[in-house]
């Protein structure tokens, strides 16, 4: 590993992997979806308690589960370091998305299962795997050094996937909880397995719930079809107006000609990462795949409420609903873009239908400053842990807290990284983590903290 301390940390991380797997299994077993309509609230409460237990056992002082305005619990704590050393905040979240269609899982979603060298289970990567990587890093440092060479603060929130703003509100009301010089936001991952990646740009996001009404009740399609103003058809026509034939999102008044100035996204890799079926190509609009992912808006229909095929009847619908998610580039005002989306949907709904649209979630974009000493230390750590130089990328997803923290701690360097990679299939059935990615990510964090504490030189890292 190039240096005795680095080698000892690597050995400690390796020795800690069995415990890491046990921790992850305990976390995955908790159905911590922060929506009581889907999973019991008690599951999130139990997850928060377990996270607190794990951090306390690792040695973090003052662990407390803070209630947040959205009803979730955020687990926080802080351990002082040697005088004059940097303050580092490690962030993750313990809530997860629902399991989706159980038929899409080859293993039990709430049971960590090893198959073909990977660990499967909901949250195994996003974001319980990231949490476990940070725990593993802290334990390795303590095992080798007897303590941590910097001040370490932790934040693990319980409603990130809901974009309901609980942790953001808590941080704004209690900024002392997030004060730091460097922030490791462990909620992203690598562009491919084994290639260390720092995410430097996040899209903003905003979802809306749209309800279309045309009749007080469904009408028989034989008696009324043709003349009946079908609410489902009206909804589909409005939704279709969000994209042009090339796939470009074309919302009235919203710029859609941005150009990504970073590395391109290879179409073959995208095809494999997204698991496109035969005969279907990636969309690129009037630009490139990277432009659509990171430099232009993207409207996605997430769900539609209408009769399922299993309950089909010969009827034109009087009401239909849909949730539409909008992603915008980091420098675009997400709130203004969401308003344009609402106005667009209203103006493109036909038949004189009654239209109700309400915002569901909102998160602003983020762009990192990458020229500081902490970023340099993280690059060195990643190079040692992974055996190659780190790359940077944009992220189509959003982490609303990133923007809030950039405002609350303007001098801090914010680094986004994690255990996720394309095969992890986060937010999909069959989510998994590669244990080697977890191990390497943990080692990178341990080396980073040691470097910030002045215990590694560039040559010895």
Image (tube, grey):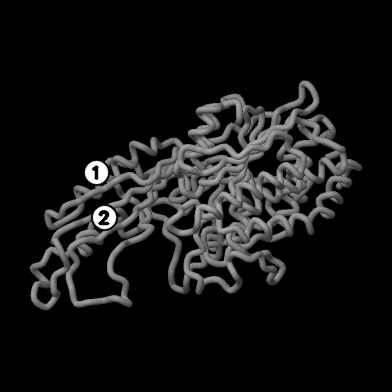
Mark 2, other Cα within 10 Å: few <14 / some 14–19 / many ≥20: some
Q: Nearer the viewer, residue 446 or 315?
A: 315
The residue most toward the top is 84
Residue 241 shows which numbered tag?
2
Mark with earlier residue (1, 2): 2
Against 379, residue 24 (above or below) is: below
Residue 343 shows which numbered tag?
1
Mark 1, other Cα within 10 Å: few <14 / some 14–19 / many ≥20: some
* The quadrant where residue 174 appears: top right
Q: Is residue 193 left or right of residue 101?
A: right
Give the secondary structure at mark 1: helix
Residue 290: where, in percent of width, then height?
Answer: 49, 50
Q: Nearer the viewer, residue 422 or 49?
A: 49
The residue most toward the front is 42
Mark in the foreground, 1 or 2: 1
Residue 75: where, in percent of width, then height?
Answer: 61, 40
Against 344, residue 303 (above or below) is: below
- Name the quarter where the C terminus is drawn: top right
Q: Is residue 100 left or right of residue 269?
A: left
Residue at image location 31% in from the left, 55% down from the top: 243
| Residue 375 shows in the view | no
Residue 166: where, in percent of width, then height?
Answer: 49, 39
The residue most toward the right is 4
Give the secondary structure at mark 2: loop
Residue at image location 44% in from the left, 38% down from the top: 364
């Amino acid at each position: 590993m190039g240096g005795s301390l680095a080698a000892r940390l690597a050995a400690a991380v390796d020795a800690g992997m069995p415990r890491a797997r046990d921790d992850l299994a305990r976390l995955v077993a908790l159905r911590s979806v922060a929506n009581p309509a889907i999973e019991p609230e008690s599951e999130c409460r139990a997850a928060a308690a377990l996270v607190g237990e794990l951090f306390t056992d690792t040695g973090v002082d003052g662990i407390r589960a803070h209630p947040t305005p959205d009803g979730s619990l955020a687990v926080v704590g802080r351990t002082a370091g040697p005088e004059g050393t940097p303050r580092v905040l490690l962030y993750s979240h313990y809530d997860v998305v629902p399991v989706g269609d159980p038929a899409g899982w080859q293993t039990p979603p709430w049971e960590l299962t090893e198959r073909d060298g990977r660990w499967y289970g909901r949250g195994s990567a996003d974001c319980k795997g990231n949490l476990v990587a940070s725990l593993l890093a802290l334990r390795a440092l303590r095992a080798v050094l007897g303590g941590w060479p910097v001040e370490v603060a932790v934040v693990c929130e319980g409603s990130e996937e809901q974009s309901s703003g609980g942790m953001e509100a808590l941080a704004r009301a209690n900024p002392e909880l997030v004060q730091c010089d460097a922030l490791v936001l462990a909620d992203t991952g690598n562009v491919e397995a084994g290639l260390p990646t720092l995410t430097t740009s996040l899209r903003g996001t905003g979802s809306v719930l749209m309800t279309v009404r045309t009749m007080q009740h469904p009408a028989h399609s034989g008696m009324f079809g043709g003349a009946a103003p079908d609410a489902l058809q009206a909804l589909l026509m409005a939704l279709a107006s969000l994209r042009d034939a090339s796939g470009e999102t074309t919302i009235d008044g919203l710029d859609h000609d941005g150009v990504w100035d970073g590395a391109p996204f290879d179409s073959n890799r995208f095809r494999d990462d997204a698991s496109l079926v035969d005969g279907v190509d990636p969309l690129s609009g009037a630009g490139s795949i990277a432009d659509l992912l990171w430099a232009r808006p993207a409207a996605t229909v997430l769900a539609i409420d209408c009769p399922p095929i299993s309950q089909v009847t010969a009827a034109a619908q009087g009401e239909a609903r849909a949730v539409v998610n909008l992603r915008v580039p980091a420098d675009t005002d997400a709130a203004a873009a969401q308003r344009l989306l609402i106005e667009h949907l209203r103006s493109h709904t036909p038949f004189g239908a009654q239209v109700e649209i309400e915002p569901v979630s909102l998160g602003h974009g983020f762009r990192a400053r990458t020229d500081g000493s902490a970023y340099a230390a993280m690059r060195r750590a990643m190079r040692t842990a992974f055996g190659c130089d780190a790359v940077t990328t944009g992220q189509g997803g959003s982490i609303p807290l990133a923007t809030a923290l950039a405002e609350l701690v303007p001098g801090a360097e914010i680094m986004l990284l994690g255990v996720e990679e394309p095969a992890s299939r986060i937010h999909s059935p069959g989510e998994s983590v590669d244990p080697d990615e977890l191990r390497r990510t943990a080692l990178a964090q341990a080396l980073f903290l040691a470097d910030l504490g002045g215990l590694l030189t560039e040559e010895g890292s």
